[in-house]
Amino acid sequence: MKDLKHLKYFEDLLEDINNDLVRQAQAEGKLALGYTCFHAPEVLMNLDNCFSVRLRAPHTESLEMSTYYMANNSCEYARALLERAIEGSLSFLDAMIGVDVCEANNRAIENMEILKTQGEDKHNFFFSNLDIPYSDDEDCVLHLTEQVTRKILKPLHERYGVDISDAKVREAVALHNEVCRIITELAEYKKPELPSITGYEFHVITLCTYVCPKWLIIDKLRETLEEVKNRKPDSKKFYRVRVALVGSEIDDPNVIRLIEDAGAFVVVDRFCFGSLPGRQEIILNDEEDAVKQICRQNLMVTRCPRQCAKHCVDRRYDDVARLVKEFNADGAIYEQMKFCTYWSYERTMASHIMPEEYDVITLSIDRPYIVGNSGQLRTRIQAFVESLEIKKLHHKKEGK
Ligand code: SF4
Ligand code: SF4
């Protein structure tokens, strides 16, 4: 396929968390709000003159300093963020919206607060730590609404004068929804046997929507969608099998590149920093307070394994099986950030439940934050690709 016109532009934006568009927005007087997890409703950090930056740590090499403050068997994603904060790379932020979701996330942000890693000139800077419920009933919705109102909206208004009115929330939802529609439509072009976008390209674009001010990137997104609509796919498949990738944080497109180079086209991105969930439109009615509706939707669409109510657990398996079918995937890869407790039990359970109860062949892997060019991971993916091909051959022989 012909290269996407803006791919290099999008890739460059991922080289640095404080990228050109973040700097441009701040030079225009906008406020950059850092956050780490889907459970902090992204759209509420994009009100009025604010924009959200979902934190990554590209090009991390050493975790030496963060490991002094956090256990060396704690999540490397969380440690990598702390490392960057200690180095001063997060001092551009105007607030840090933390979440009480896992011990590693908590410890990383708590240490940032204790070590005062925010810039010295950031007098109005604040840290917040949202308590996130484990289910999605109306009590949970009320609790999350109270948390985001008290810990995000109120300090934004009191410290920075941000307009947090219902009208502004709905305005932010409108732009958020346009981004979501573009990403969802782009995903459709992965469905055909000869797709017009690769999993790598899709992930690069999706990631940019999490780390750049949305109003500065929307034109390039619109243009890219038009380009993909008219793009001529390769006449031969560039992959051997199609897979759903399910799991914790993947904020490095090179992970997807490595999997696709091993022959597995990533057709479904059901992981943190992917489009499922995260890039579903937020549908608002006019009667109810918009913040409450956003909180309800966030709790309904999350597929995070910390949500331990029985119906949330069942919904996750059902959903992966549905996506495998919808995107015509041959199997699923469950990946877990090394030392992540939630995903360790989710992937262990899934490695039995998905093949035995849903007939979805599953590979289960854990990985370091920085995958680089891991030969071990490549070998495991290649072996999985072969096993999926063998199964397809059997099905063919049996006329399935
Ligand atoms: S795995 Fe769950 S808790 Fe962790 S970042 Fe993703 S959504 Fe948040
Ligand atoms: S990968 Fe797991 S341990 Fe790490 S921040 Fe996400 S939820 Fe927490």
Image (cartoon, rainbow, N blue to C red):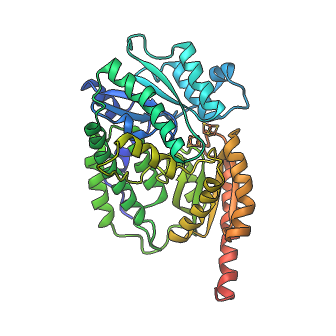
Q: Is residue 33 above or below residue 212?
A: above
Q: Residue at x 52, y 60 (%)?
A: 268
From the top left corner, tell me how far across and down residue 25 is, in percent.
29, 30
The number of numbered discs placed on residues in the rendered structure image is 0
Quarter of the picture containing the N terminus is bottom left
From the top left corner, tell me how far across and down residue 239 is, in percent.
54, 67
From the top left corner, tell me how far across and down residue 81 is, in percent.
55, 29
In the image, 81 versus 281, the foreground residue is 281
Q: Is residue 19 left or right of residue 59?
A: left
Q: Is residue 114 left or right of residue 287?
A: right
Q: Is residue 6 visible?
A: no
Picture quarter with ligand 1: top right
Q: Is residue 299 visible?
A: yes
In the image, 286 versus 395, the foreground residue is 286
From the top left corner, tell me how far across and down residue 356 is, in percent.
74, 68
Q: Residue at x 58, y 46 (%)?
A: 135
Q: Is residue 126 left or right of residue 87?
A: left
Q: Is residue 275 left or right of residue 50?
A: right
The part of the image, by quadrant, that contains residue 47 is: top left
Q: Is residue 103 above or below residue 87?
A: below
